[in-house]
Image (spheres, grey):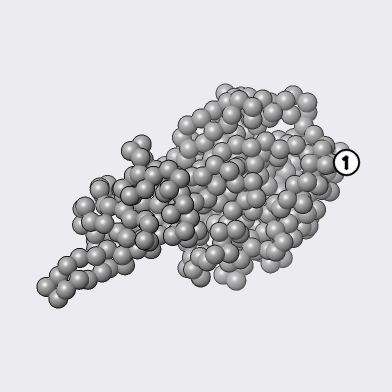
């Protein structure tokens, strides 16, 4: 398959730069086999039923974007240069993070960047364009200083339109975020508020939490025309024994397992590659394209994705390429809002439908 098979034209004005308020008021496109329904996220109460299990990614996005200064003495006196850093992943050596640094050429090995009165970092290594920064703090002290100094790492297509602000620290975080480590949000989950969760729980919908720390690689473009040559970025995830048991029980009981977001889907399908869900922990680089056999997920709630992206390939694998073209054409014609802060879709493959017309 070619990269062009997953392309489409999107009007720039459909790229959302702020989320819907309240969260559950966002629009929801429900695609059930060949049928398409226009709804809102709070209408999930009409599409879900007792015994359904939503799988939720409980990763917490860190305010990974930092702005600081590098200081030097020169013949003209003290000079400073502005340095931007986006943290990517903590290293085994406590206090060291890999990061994208701009402009990297303005830093020398061993130089210090001052991000705030409390937070500083020294450049220790450069490998394949990534900087490795050693911070002056670790543990809870580092977390507190980062929360004070950092900004949310908004996706490039939002950051190009506006800078991150204080509101994003709430908007770009799920209401159940728990385990810190992501540098991008599991955005389909941003549509849930506490009221919707309570309503779904009361009607018998069950919830399972898994963790996948979304990396900046989620925004990297596919650069090869033959998609089989693409190498996925790896992200750390965990499906606990309890989570695996809950999902397995739902499958055994004939219920539907519905991951909220592609990150949750990729993780449970990684843990289910043996044919059934199992406890799992590690780095996953699973690449889901048309022809993939889904062993765990029965449907998917997700946002609308970038053209020519691996996530377009994933939803095409679930629904079929022609169906996804129809779904996205409908979404564009009906002015759905796209990408991280945009509207949502509930994708139900035809084989998962029942005679009642509900999933």
Residue closest to the eye, 67 or 26: 67
Residue at the location (52% across, 36% down)?
237
Q: Nearest the camera: 127 or 211?
A: 211
Residue 109, percent from left and from top: 21, 53
Circle 1: is it few (<14), some (14-19), or many (20+) Cα within 10 Å? few
Res 313 visible: no
Q: Seen in the image, is 312 located left or right of residue 110?
A: right
Q: Secondary structure at mark 1?
A: loop
Determine which quarter of the picture holds residue 23: bottom right
Q: Is residue 160 above or below residue 132?
A: below
For residue 294, what is the image quadrant? top right
| Residue at the extreme left | 75
Residue at image point 70% right, 64% down: 21
Q: Does residue 187 appear to the left or right of 52 in the view shown? A: left
- Which residue is the site of mark 1? 356
The residue lying at 48 percent from left, 55 percent from top is: 147
Identified at 50% across, 47% down, the residue is 182
Where does the image place residue 49, in percent across and percent down from the top left?
82, 40
Q: Tell me: residue 210, above or below residue 104.
A: above
Whole-percent x and y of residue 175?
65, 50
Residue reaching furthest to the right = 356
Q: Nearer the viewer, residue 162 or 113?
A: 113
């Amino acid at each position: 398959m070619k990269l062009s098979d997953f392309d489409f034209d999107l009007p720039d004005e459909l790229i959302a730069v702020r989320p819907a308020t309240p969260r559950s008021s966002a629009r929801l496109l429900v695609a059930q086999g060949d049928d398409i329904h226009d709804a809102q996220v709070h209408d999930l109460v009409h599409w879900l039923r007792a015994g359904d299990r939503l799988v939720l990614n409980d990763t917490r996005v860190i305010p990974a974007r930092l702005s600081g200064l590098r200081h030097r003495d020169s013949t003209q006196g003290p000079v400073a240069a502005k340095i931007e850093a986006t943290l990517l992943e903590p290293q085994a050596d406590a206090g060291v993070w890999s990061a994208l640094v701009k402009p990297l050429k303005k830093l020398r090995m061993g130089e210090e960047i001052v991000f705030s009165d409390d937070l500083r970092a020294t450049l220790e290594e450069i490998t394949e364009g990534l900087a490795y920064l050693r911070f002056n703090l670790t543990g809870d002290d580092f977390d507190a200083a980062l929360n004070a100094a950092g900004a949310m790492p908004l996706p490039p297509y939002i950051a190009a339109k506006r800078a991150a602000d204080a509101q994003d620290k709430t908007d770009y975080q799920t209401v159940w975020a728990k385990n810190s480590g992501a540098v991008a949000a599991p955005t389909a989950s941003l549509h849930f508020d506490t009221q919707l969760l309570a309503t779904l729980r009361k009607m018998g919908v069950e919830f399972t939490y898994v963790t996948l720390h979304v990396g900046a690689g989620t925004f990297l473009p596919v650069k090869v025309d033959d998609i089989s040559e693409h190498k996925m970025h790896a992200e750390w995830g965990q499906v606990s024994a309890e989570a695996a048991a809950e999902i397995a029980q739902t499958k055994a009981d004939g219920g539907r397992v519905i991951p909220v977001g592609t990150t949750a889907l990729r993780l449970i399908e990684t843990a289910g590659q043996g044919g059934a869900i199992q406890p799992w922990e590690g780095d996953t680089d699973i690449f889901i394209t048309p022809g993939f056999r889904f062993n765990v997920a029965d449907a998917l709630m997700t946002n609308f994705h970038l053209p020519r992206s691996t996530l377009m390939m994933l939803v095409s694998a679930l629904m079929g390429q022609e169906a996804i073209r129809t779904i996205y054409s409908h979404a564009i014609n009906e002015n759905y809002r796209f990408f991280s802060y945009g509207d949502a879709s509930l994708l139900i493959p035809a084989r998962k439908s029942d005679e009642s017309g509900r999933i």
